[in-house]
Image (spheres, rainbow, N blue to C red):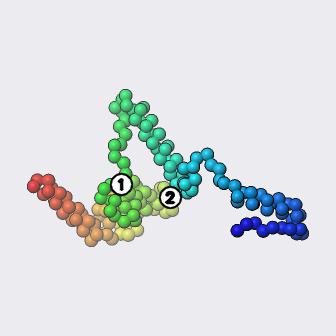
Amino acid sequence: MGAPSHCGGSRDTPASKAEFADMMAKDAASSPIRAPNEALLRQTSLTHLKRKASVVRSHGTEQWIRQSTSLRASYAPRKKTGFRPALKKERKALASRYYQLLTGHAITAPYLKEKLHKRDSDKCWFCLSGRRRTREHLFKDCDRWLPQIRALWLSMENDLQDKDKRHYI
């Protein structure tokens, strides 16, 4: 589909400008795309290019850390990176909630109050006990979630006993 031809022009556009625009459009459509690197043409997604740049930067950072710390033992870079193996099989929503709890970025009352400034109080609104609604409170002694807490700790205890049995067999 080409640009329409403007023979004779119109009220707003003189004929010479319209013809020039047609000529430029036809020239652009017929000329091959010139790029310094043919491999770059296959990577059309901006997100993909940003990701590749990020990988190159992180690889450079890892090399710098290895070189700058190889002579002293004050810092040892992590050998393993990535997700915990058990979470690779879980749904993304569950795994992300776990990592939020692990890093302290879960939507708990202290996080809402101190980091996001969305609440005036960091007290638990589930059990109304007056205690801070922290991870520890939610997983150990919140009255609202006592049945779920008991089931969670019981299943963890059973899992640990199974692991201990396998270890000694």
The residue lying at 73 percent from left, 66 percent from top is 2
Q: Residues within 10 Å of mark 1 (few under 14, many from 20)?
A: few
In this orientation, which residue lies closer to the viewer: 152 or 11? Answer: 11
Among the 4 quarters of the image, the one containing residue 150: bottom left
Judged left or right of residue 70, residue 151 is left
Give the amino acid type for the residue marked by disc 2 in the picture.
Answer: Leu
Q: Is residue 136 in sight in this rendering?
A: yes
Q: Is residue 103 above or below residue 126?
A: above
In this orientation, which residue lies closer to the viewer: 21 or 146? Answer: 21
Give the amino acid type for the residue marked by disc 1 in the picture.
Answer: Phe
Q: Residue furthest top?
A: 71
Residue 129 % position (x, y): 35, 66
Disc 2 to disc 1, C-alpha distance = 26 Å
In this orientation, which residue lies closer to the viewer: 118 or 40? Answer: 40
Residue mark closest to the camera, 2 vs 1: 1
Judged left or right of residue 9, residue 151 is left
The label number, if any, that marks residue 83 in the structure image: 1
Where's the C terminus, which quadrant?
A: bottom left
Residue indicated by mark 2: 116
Total label count? 2
Q: Is residue 132 in sight in this rendering?
A: no
Q: Are marks 2 and 1 in contact (CB under 8 Å)?
A: no
